[in-house]
Image: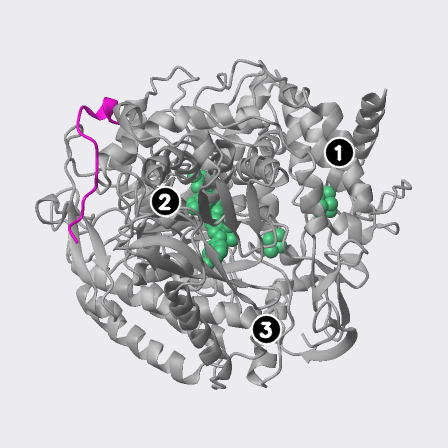
């Protein structure tokens, strides 16, 4: 099948308006006869479910947690972007569009990104109307902060819990529709396959996670909003249950999977402390506004610190290497995420890591405390303040800005970050890759849509901070409700989709056989054993920097791991009951397949772009020596993979990217 | 460290449950409580036994899934944290730790340490929202200024994660702190005023219907709440209810 992005003709700024003026609409009386399944209730699925139900469709929503409110969007800390220009600092739709395309290293689709920037302002209006308590200034107006690598303040936030508040907003809108009977909510249900009838997505097979029952659900369209697949690395900042299963199942039934290798590794996470570690915790990017990142200059100091003979505060300024400030004088500690992460890895690989595992660098607030303290002393008219007084005043300001993060750090690490620098290390955080969708957010299976982190659409090869929340809500509140209507307009006379058909029989049989196999396998290794092995291969060979040799090895190793898994995995418990090990087994089986495709995608993309750094594609001389080198001539395309039975046999389809409104440039942060 | 765990095991909602003893060894003080449970479960799987089922997801104190009653306290001995944020440094070598599910008539056990909190969902569905449809034409977000103080207070109430520790802790199994937090968030914002009376009446009626007990002002909920939701929210809800009824 040829890839058609279905981007409307016309000038960039008119495309979405013209499109909305011309699409088919479904009249309100007919919407009552149309069912839509939404898999996932995070920001994307929650906002879509509520909006579709308000419009009059019958929505069936699914989540594996016990409430829509617990989707992993709840964990987002920092904020959400919107081109409101409330600060009058020159922001505009175009500027948000430009920053997003540039930040994504010119690997996203212009028309989608422009639409995202266009609807961004509606999101803030909608959320405020729902009662989302965004932070405000003393005049009672909305406050903004600035976020990674952009020149304007456009990030709206609710303390350090922006994702929570936005999700609770969408959840409240869902609740209103659940109460009206327009959304039927299936908590503790996991989608295990999509059902395709006459080439169209017409339903899903789901497992009730409480009773173990396998259920058939039909609809006129299916929307996948199941989040990202960062847990393919085992350790990430995702929730324990975050998975690729829903996205992978539709891939196997015909949806192309785009750019799987584009992963964001976030520079500021709490380092791993031991082998028992189950997940990693993010420390918001906003900390880099005030924290300075460094490692010791000399290896003997590193050794002394690791052995506990020296403390970081014992080192004088000239014994420290503020490596970001040294390498990138223009942006310093505020370089984009991918650049900051690679620089930390470079220092740690060279032996300068400051904790027992050798994988940690310092994020130091001492200078900020002094700077704020001095400023406060002036404001408060304190003459000749003592150093202790300055520190006290400075700590108060730092506490007001980052108090909850500092407390979170202290609870986990048991060290006081006001007194000693934090230790941080990069961790897998977000996946820009995902299910390929056209401008309508439809996958290559007609009637099957993908929204939110589950699709590949808007962030190219690297996502800017505070843009995922924006995209999830844009897709769910303002884009999908239009585009899906255009498709469903053909279904007003279809009537209810029956579930007693051969297509449902076959899909259910396949699902049942697979989980029965897992339960009856009686192997020797736990599911986590395989997940950890997969994670290690991914981190070592498909992590922050990649090369041909490593990627080829990864493909071989992951395939061997898959064979071992299906021979030797052990899943205790039964089928017809709550069985968390069985849930995990299914998810890990899908991660293993995805991992192989991931490595293949990374191998095929012989350029460095955004979060994907190929060692073979770096600048060899000049001031940019060692930095990532993009290759627009050969690689300005989206890789969309078609499933052919084995991940290694997947067929590549290229969607060429055209840039008419932006000039392509190499990123430079020097 | 080496520990003895006394854990509630229950096959399903219709079976009877019981406490079962387990031993875990070489637990690091840097582990989180749930990582310690992972160690136990790995041990059980490797010996062919069924692991202990428990709810968890984000493991960073925000999703509200985790819900263990540890040594007689909801979310365990530390303050201001959820079970997933509790660390093993709170315990000593040789300790015996008792682990039960959150108990309340309105939270039936599903399996082992997993309980059914759908009652909370139904209370939210009864009125925990502002009736505004999605459109691109709601008024501009800055058209109604809201004082920083009110916005901050609404935010403090809105940080409730819906975990149910307040109910599990209360001797009456009252859900007043949870419901009070939601009612307060909207009561403090101008957007919430239009439906204020119906909201509080409907949410409280649903709460009573679900079989949660009454509040007798012991304040245990506030102490155990991982998000520091204050008792003021209960007082505000009572005022809102009185206003609504006159
Ligand atoms: C710690 C952290 C902090 C972040 N901070 C920010 C930030 O400050 N700003 C920003 O813009 N972005 C941030 N992000 C990214 C952003 O939060 C996510 O990309 C976004 O919330 C994803 O939303 P979603 O709706 O696509 O998916 P999710 O919120 O992950 O929801 C997935 C849903 O799918 C369901 N599901 C999954 N699989 C199945 C299945 N098989 N069957 C049934 N249901 C299923 C789940 O139950 C859940 O309801 C952060 C991410 C993390 C991890
Ligand atoms: S009020 Fe506190 S204890 Fe009760 S559900 Fe909310 S966060 Fe949990
Ligand atoms: S697992 Fe999310 S709050 Fe504990």
Direction from residue A307 to residue A590 in the image, left or right: left
Q: In which quarter of the image is residue A245?
A: bottom left
**Mark 3 residue CB less than 8 A from any atom of ligand 1:** no
* Residue A576 numbered mark, or none: 3
Magenta region includes residue A13: yes
Q: Mark 3 lies on which chain?
A: A
Secondary structure type for disc 1: helix
Q: Which of marks 3 and 2 is in front?
A: 3
The quarter in which the N terminus of chain A is drawn is: bottom left
Q: How far apart are marks 1 and 3 (CA)?
A: 37 Å
Q: Quadrant of residue A467?
A: top left
**Mark 2 residue CB less than 8 A from any atom of ligand 1:** no
**Of A236 and A310, which appears nearest the observer?**
A236
Residue A616, image x and y in percent? 15, 58
Q: Quadrant of residue A234?
A: bottom left
Secondary structure type for disc 3: loop
**Mark 1 residue CB less than 8 A from any atom of ligand 2:** no
Q: Distance between the residues labelled 2 and 1?
A: 58 Å
Check chain identity for marks 2 and 1: say if they share one.
no
Residue under label 2: A322
């Amino acid at each position: 099948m040829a890839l058609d992005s279905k981007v409307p003709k016309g000038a960039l700024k008119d495309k979405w308006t013209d499109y909305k003026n011309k699409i088919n609409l479904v009249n309100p009386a007919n919407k009552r006869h149309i069912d839509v399944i939404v898999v996932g209730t995070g920001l994307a699925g929650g906002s879509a479910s509520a909006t579709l139900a308000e419009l009059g469709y019958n929505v069936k929503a699914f989540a594996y947690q016990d409430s829509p409110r617990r989707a992993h969007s709840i964990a987002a800390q920092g904020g959400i972007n919107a081109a409101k220009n409330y600060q009058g600092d020159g922001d505009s739709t175009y500027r948000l569009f430009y920053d997003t395309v540039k930040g994504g290293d010119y690997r996203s689709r212009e028309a989608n990104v422009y639409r995202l920037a266009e609807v961004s302002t509606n999101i803030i209006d909608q959320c405020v109307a729902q009662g989302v308590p965004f932070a405000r200034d003393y005049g009672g107006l909305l406050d903004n902060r600035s976020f990674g690598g952009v020149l304007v303040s456009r990030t709206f936030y609710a303390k350090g819990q922006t994702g929570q508040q936005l999700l609770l907003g969408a959840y409240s809108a869902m609740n209103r529709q659940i109460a009206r009977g327009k959304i039927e909510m299936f908590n503790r249900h996991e989608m295990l396959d999509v059902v395709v009838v006459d080439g169209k997505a017409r339903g899903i097979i789901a497992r009730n996670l409480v009773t173990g029952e396998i259920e058939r659900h039909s609809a006129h369209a299916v929307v996948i909003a199941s989040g990202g697949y960062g847990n393919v690395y085992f350790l990430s900042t995702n929730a324990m249950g975050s998975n690729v299963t829903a996205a992978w199942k539709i891939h196997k039934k015909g949806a192309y999977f785009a750019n799987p290798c584009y992963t964001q590794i976030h520079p500021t996470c709490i380092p791993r402390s031991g082998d028992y570690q189950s997940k990693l915790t993010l420390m918001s990017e906003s900390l880099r506004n005030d924290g300075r990142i460094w490692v010791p200059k000399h290896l003997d100091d590193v050794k002394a610190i690791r052995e506990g003979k020296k403390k970081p505060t014992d080192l004088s300024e000239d014994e420290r290497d503020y490596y970001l400030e040294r390498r990138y004088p223009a942006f310093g500690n505020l370089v984009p995420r991918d650049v900051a992460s690679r620089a930390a890895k470079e220092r740690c690989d060279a032996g300068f890591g400051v904790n027992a595992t050798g994988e940690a660098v310092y994020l130091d607030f001492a200078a900020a405390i002094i700077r704020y303290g001095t400023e406060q002393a002036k404001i408060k008219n304190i003459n000749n303040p003592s150093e202790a007084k300055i520190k006290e005043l400075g700590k108060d300001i730092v506490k007001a800005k980052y108090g909850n993060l500092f407390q979170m750090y202290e609870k986990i690490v048991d060290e006081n970050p006001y007194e000693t620098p934090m230790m941080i290390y990069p961790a897998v955080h977000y996946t820009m890759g995902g299910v390929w969708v056209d401008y309508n957010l439809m996958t290559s299976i007609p009637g099957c849509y993908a929204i939110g982190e589950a699709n590949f659409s808007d962030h190219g090869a690297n996502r800017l901070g505070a843009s995922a929340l924006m995209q999830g809500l844009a897709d769910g509140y303002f884009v999908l409700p239009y585009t899906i209507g255009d498709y469903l307009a053909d279904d007003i006379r279809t009537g209810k989709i029956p579930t007693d058909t051969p297509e449902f029989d076959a899909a259910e049989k396949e699902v049942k056989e697979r989980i029965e196999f897992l339960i009856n396998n009686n192997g020797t290794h736990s599911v986590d054993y395989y997940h950890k092995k997969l994670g290690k291969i991914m981190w070592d060979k498909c992590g922050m920097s990649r090369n041909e040799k490593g990627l080829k090895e990864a493909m071989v190793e992951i395939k061997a791991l898959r064979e071992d898994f299906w021979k030797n995995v052990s899943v205790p418990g039964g089928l017809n009951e709550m069985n968390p090990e069985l849930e995990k087994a299914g998810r890990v089986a899908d991660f293993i397949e995805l991992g192989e495709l991931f490595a293949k995608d990374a191998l095929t993309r012989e350029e460095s772009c955004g979060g994907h750094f190929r060692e073979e594609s770096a600048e060899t001389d000049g001031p940019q020596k060692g930095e990532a080198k993009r290759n627009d001539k050969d690689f300005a395309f989206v890789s969309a993979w078609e499933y052919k039975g084995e991940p290694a046999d997947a067929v590549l389809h290229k969607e060429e990217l055209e840039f008419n409104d932006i000039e392509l440039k190499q990123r430079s942060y020097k | 460290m080496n520990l003895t765990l006394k854990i509630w095991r229950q096959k399903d909602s219709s079976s009877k449950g019981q406490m079962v003893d387990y031993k875990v060894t070489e637990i690091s003080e840097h582990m989180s409580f749930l990582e310690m449970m992972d160690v136990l479960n790995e041990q059980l799987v490797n010996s062919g036994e069924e692991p202990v089922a428990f709810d968890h997801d984000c493991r960073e104190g925000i999703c509200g899934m985790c819900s263990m009653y540890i040594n007689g306290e909801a979310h365990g001995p530390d303050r201001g944290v959820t079970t997933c944020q509790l660390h093993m440094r709170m315990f000593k070598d040789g300790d015996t730790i008792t682990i039960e599910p959150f108990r309340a008539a309105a939270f039936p056990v599903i399996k082992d340490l997993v309980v059914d909190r759908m009652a909370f969902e139904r209370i939210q569905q009864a009125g925990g929202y502002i009736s505004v449809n999605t459109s691109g034409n709601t008024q501009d977000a800055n058209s109604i200024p809201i004082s920083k103080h009110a916005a901050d207070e609404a935010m403090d109430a809105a940080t409730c994660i819906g975990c149910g520790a307040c109910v599990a802790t209360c001797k009456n199994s009252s859900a007043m702190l949870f419901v009070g937090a939601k009612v307060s968030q909207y009561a403090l914002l101008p957007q919430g005023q239009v439906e204020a009376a119906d909201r509080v009446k409907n949410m409280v009626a649903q709460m009573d219907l679900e079989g949660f007990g009454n509040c007798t002002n012991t304040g245990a909920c506030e102490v155990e709440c991982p998000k520091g939701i204050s008792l003021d929210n209960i007082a505000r809800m009572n005022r809102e209810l009185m206003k609504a009824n006159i």
